[in-house]
């Protein structure tokens, strides 16, 4: 499928999705959100894709925010629908994606851009990255999961400060806050993310899918994460990957997981 605002490339089972609106600093508009949804939907069905890396074109921005011109004159009802549809189509879809999603954050990740990075399963940042949720400076609040995911990652107090001040933090602060897992040189960002993806792919992708569900369950209202872990743990015993993994371990050889 051809896209206007994003680029996709598959190499050695790694799908790289690049948001490509450099003149707008890769800002998210509704068309880009829809294209990202379609790209992830395709990746979910494509057996060749094992890991997804999400990044922005150029070094200036991962995603500099939402395209404010699209909703500046919205009514409360329209604003609520904008948030709900965006979360369903993209942000929650990414957070619950059954394959690992790594955000490679280059440059600005602000507003919806940081919310998108936080929806990924973990984040790697370049040294020039700047992150923040500046929505309160526009008279609104984060609407794509930012008020929920930021406290989960950095703690309530720091999340309150970041949202209330509408300020930015740099990559070293983001690492200190546990908002990102690693910081790299800008020209090493994608290589680092790809190497991380290769480490992931050495393991059972079926087990990783179950682990994603179990970890996310702890953050979902009405779900008991421990019960989900028990369910996923038991389900793993019926997989071919479990048989291969245990056999390889007992026979002191490298596992070759069939992915079933």
Image (cartoon, helix red, strand yellow):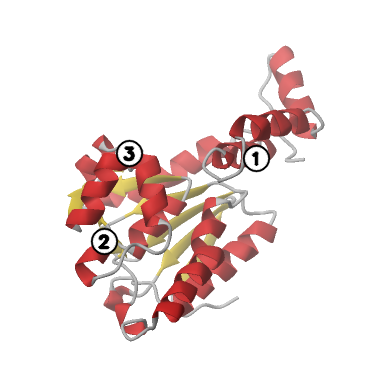
Return the disc, 2 or 1, that comes first in the chain's sequence. 2
| Foreground of the two, 111 or 141 | 141
Instruction: Using the image, determine if residue 243 lies above or below residue 26.
Output: above
Q: SS of the residue at dot 1?
A: helix
In the figure, residue 73 lies in which quadrant? bottom left
**Residue for point 41% across, 76% down:** 79
Mark 1 packing: few (<14 Cα in 10 Å), some, or many (20+)? Answer: many
The residue at which mark 2 appears reads as 59
Whether residue 23 sits left or right of residue 146 in the image: it is left
Q: SS of the residue at dot 2?
A: loop
**Residue for point 64% across, 42% down:** 209
Q: SS of the residue at dot 3?
A: loop
How far apart in space, not on screen, are marks 1 and 3 (Cα)? 30 Å
Question: In the rendering, which numbered label is found on residue 205?
Answer: 1
Mark 3 packing: few (<14 Cα in 10 Å), some, or many (20+)? Answer: some
Mark whose residue sits in front, 1 or 3: 3
The residue at which mark 3 appears reads as 155
2 and 1 marks in contact (CB < 8 Å):
no
**Residue for point 28% across, 51% down:** 187
Q: Position of residue 121 (x, y in %)?
A: 48, 46
Q: Position of residue 190 (x, y in %)?
A: 38, 51
Mark 2 packing: few (<14 Cα in 10 Å), some, or many (20+)? Answer: some
Question: In the rendering, which numbered label is found on residue 135?
Answer: none
């Amino acid at each position: 499928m051809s896209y206007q605002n994003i680029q996709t490339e598959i190499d050695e089972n790694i799908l790289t999705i690049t948001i490509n609106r450099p003149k707008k600093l890769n800002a998210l508009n509704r068309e880009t959100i829809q294209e990202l949804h379609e790209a992830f939907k395709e990746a979910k069905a494509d057996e060749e894709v094992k890991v997804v890396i999400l990044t922005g074109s150029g070094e200036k921005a991962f995603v500099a925010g939402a395209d404010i011109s699209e909703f500046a004159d919205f009514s409360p009802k329209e604003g609520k629908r904008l948030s709900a549809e965006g979360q369903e189509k993209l942000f929650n879809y990414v957070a619950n994606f059954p394959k690992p999603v790594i955000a490679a954050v280059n440059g600005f990740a602000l507003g919806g851009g940081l919310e998108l990075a936080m929806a990924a399963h973990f984040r790697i940042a370049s040294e020039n990255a700047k992150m923040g949720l500046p929505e309160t400076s526009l008279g609104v609040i984060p609407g794509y999961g930012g008020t929920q995911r930021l406290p989960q990652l950095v703690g309530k107090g720091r999340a309150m400060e970041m949202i209330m001040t509408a300020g930015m933090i740099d990559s070293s602060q983001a690492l200190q806050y546990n908002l990102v897992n690693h910081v790299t040189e800008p020209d090493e960002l994608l290589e680092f993310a790809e190497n991380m993806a290769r480490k992931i792919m050495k393991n059972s992708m079926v087990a990783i899918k179950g682990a994603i569900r179990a970890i996310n369950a702890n953050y979902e209202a009405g779900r008991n994460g421990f019960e989900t872990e028990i369910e996923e743990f038991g389900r793993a015993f019926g997989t071919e990957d479990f048989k291969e993994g245990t056999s390889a371990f007992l026979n002191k050889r490298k596992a070759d997981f069939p992915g079933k």
